[in-house]
Image (tube, helix red, strand yellow):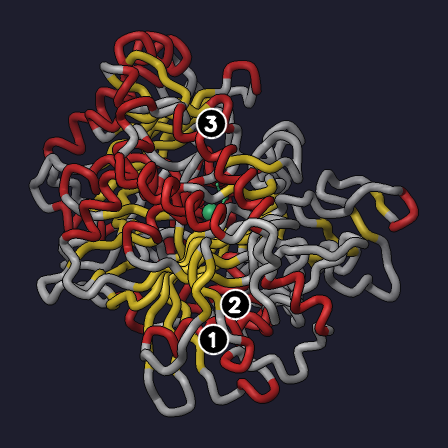
Amino acid sequence: MAMQNQKVREWVDEMARLTKPDRIVWLDGSEAENRRLLAQACESGELIPLNPQKHPGSYLHRSDPQDVARTEHCTFICTEKREDVGPTNNWLPSGEAKTLLKGLFDGVMRGRTLYVIPFLLGPRHSPFSKVGIELTDSLYVAVNMRIMTRMGEAALEELGESGDFIKGLHSTGNLDPQKRYICHFPEDKTIYSINSGYGGNALLSKKCAALRIASWLGREESWLAEHMLIMGIENPQGEKIYIAAALPSACGKTNLAMLQPDGKFKGYRIFCVGDDIAWLRPGRDGQLYAVNPEAGFFGVAPGTNFQTNPNMMKTISRNTLFTNVAMASDQRVWWEGLELPKDGEILDWQGRLWDPTLGWKAAHPNARFTAPIRQCPIYAPEWDRPEGVPISAVIFGCRRSTIVPLICESFHWQHGVYLGATMSSETTAAAAGAVGVVRRDPMAMLPFCGYNMADYFDHWLRIGRQLKRPPRIFRVNWFRTDEKGKFIWPGFGENIRVLKWIMDRCHDKVDCLETPIGRLPLLQDLDLEGVGVDPAGLRQLFEVDPEEWLKAAEEQTEFFSLFGTRLPGELLKEQEFLVARLRSRKGEHLPSV
Ligand code: SAT
Ligand code: MN
């Protein structure tokens, strides 16, 4: 590939002098190159070809068992000043971190190939878009990056002669978890990642560039990089709106992004623009516009099936890379949530012979698939629109078995930012650590915000002030459970009922019930026919217990106080008013349905 850009070349040379690979291969993103890389990966054992009839063009990768999820304790934001990364990020002083990383990367690619991967985040010719270059010694990373981003020539063409690109250096090193580092230097738009090959740690375009580095850039340039899906909804009358929704990792964001309305909601159409990351900026008309910087899905396999996400099942029917799923003897993939094959044997995600009596899961709970967005049957061609899509509603979703009602609308932008900032959620398998523990996860960005979250909240408030027609902000919780621990709300395709209410609110078609925590639906406006939730369940789904919420507000104080005086006063004011509203309704059971 003709490599004209002097700045890129200099940087590649410098990193090659450090890492000392045997050879350097520049990737152009072409089909022929992809075939060559896939063949090489099969030869080296990094990929296992799957049944060509059942899974055309698809492969299985088994990772090191110690390298199966993001490792937040090894993830650092490295800056001059600690205050700039705030109390919720791990910090290293940039000078010290560079010395440490230089030591770790010195000679690490000896005997290996260094792949140069230019990638474009966002549509071509768009004011939103950014170019990045990832250097990696992992073939697995290279073939995944081709699916996840607009990779190769297109990115270099966008870059032209400019030296303004995000730099990412990655090596799988020796996968030593003790020496694993994912370090971000937002001040020089650089990422260094070593000793992991896992998606979020190694596909540097994803959480590292498109969220951590991009959030920093967004603050400087007046836009937002968010952990959000983008979807279009069209009602039977042909009205269409776009929604951006934040949910923590492995909480059903991908399923929501390509929801399939059924039964009486068949007249609604959903269009998927993105399932994980949204870049948002105020447009000249005073609306908020969004693009998906990515070009593929890196979704959770277990639990994905024709009931929970038929559109994804079709998306991953070909040209898909599977990671840490199980495999049946006919080279078909399998995971928990799919029907067990009637005959033949199953190898678990580590290649061990498996059967259901063994007591462990065949697929790793964070097993993933990588597939191009264009294969999605409800893919929105607007995905590639340089100006993005106008957002009418923002959703902050959390995973809470108690307290938080199914849906609630904020009173206004500032209150919506407060709802986002006070999100808490039960942890999942997407990150290493205990699962099911409640933790604060503001805007589902706790692990992904590249700067001080107090400044981030302030940035959200500032963006709101630039919008003449701001989106409405909602909070959802699909995960409330009953006394027996069973989910009350069926979720998945039935979530269309909640989206319909959101859409009706955006079109001023329905009223609402004012409660201390926000606006709840009037039950008659929420189409619940045939949803299968009994009246007691409904009461629980929408219950707002002022006592419980007062306790929750107190816990927020603890979180807010982490940020000291840097926390925007607007959020404290929202909290103060919430507490006052709750106190005035103490002892009541809200709402009465
Ligand atoms: O971090 S990943 O992008 O690999 C998965 C996730 O946590 O959403
Ligand atoms: Mn995610």
User: Residue 377 got which mark?
Assistant: 1
The disc, 1 or 3, on the residue closer to the chain's N-terminal end is 1
Q: Where does the image place residue 186, in percent across and percent down from the top left? A: 25, 28
Report the front residue among 282 and 169: 282
Q: Earlier in the sequence, mark 1 or mark 2?
A: 2
Q: Is residue 513 left or right of residue 577?
A: right
Cβ–Cβ under 8 Å for marks 1 and 2: yes
Measured Cα–Cα span from mark 1 to mark 3: 45 Å
Task: State which mark lies toward you, 1 or 3.
Answer: 3
Q: Is residue 330 above or below residue 529?
A: above
Q: Is residue 263 above or below residue 93?
A: below
* Residue linked to disc 3: 558
Q: Position of residue 449 (x, y in %)?
A: 35, 36
- The percent coordinates of residue 388 (x first, y second) are 23, 64
State how far apart marks 2 and 3 are (Cα). 43 Å
Say what amino acid the circle numbered 2 marks: Thr
- Viewer can see residue 281: yes
